Amino acid sequence: MGYKYSWNELEDGYLDENGRLKRKLIENEAEKIGRLLAKGGLNREKKKEKLTKTQLRNFYNEVKALEERINDEDSFMNNLPHILMLKAKANYAYRGGKNQKIPKSFKDFIVKNIEIISEEESYTSFDNFTTFFEAVVGYFYGHGGEDNR
């Protein structure tokens, strides 16, 4: 991977045993991911890979635009192809590490979350992702990400 973060907490999705969004995702995991994206992990060539605030905003704004269009199961299903495209866009922005626009850690974040939404295929799953992503953005800026250019 090249950076130190385990995606294990997301392996079984967003919900706890009671069917609610896992508090640990918002309280702990979002901070770890936000810090990683703001401070940068080390890639294989031993250079820090930080996410730029512009790239974060590009993806976050797209998610927020989708969120405005999605408010129930029907609108979720109608917009599912657009949600799934985020995975392709993250892979394109990463470009296999060549001329990349985003670090691998952010590509992995987007891909992992879109895979959960694809598997669960529900409006609730998308809604949980938007909440989780919003927390990551907050922690990104809280850890100095606004200075990343």
Image: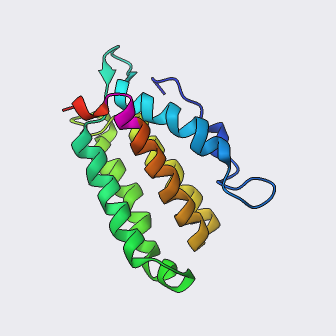
Magenta region: 140-144
- The quarter of the picture where the C terminus appears is top left
Q: Give the vertical position of 102 relative to 143 (above or below).
A: below
Q: Give the vertical position of 112 relative to 9 (above or below).
A: below
Q: How is the image coloured?
A: rainbow
**Is 73 included in the stretch rendered in magenta?**
no
Q: Position of residue 148 (x, y in %)?
A: 23, 31
Q: Position of residue 86 (x, y in %)?
A: 38, 59
Q: Residue furthest top?
A: 46
Q: Position of residue 72 (x, y in %)?
A: 54, 81
Q: Give the vertical position of 44 relative to 136 (above or below).
A: above
In-image side of 138 versus 19 (left or right): left
Q: Position of residue 48 (x, y in %)?
A: 32, 20
* The one of 103 and 133 positioned closer to us in this rendering: 133
* The one of 141 and 100 positioned closer to us in this rendering: 141
* Residue appearing at x 46%, y 50% in the figure: 133
* Residue appearing at x 80%, y 58% in the figure: 18
Q: Quadrant of residue 147?
A: top left
* Residue appearing at x 71%, y 59% in the figure: 20
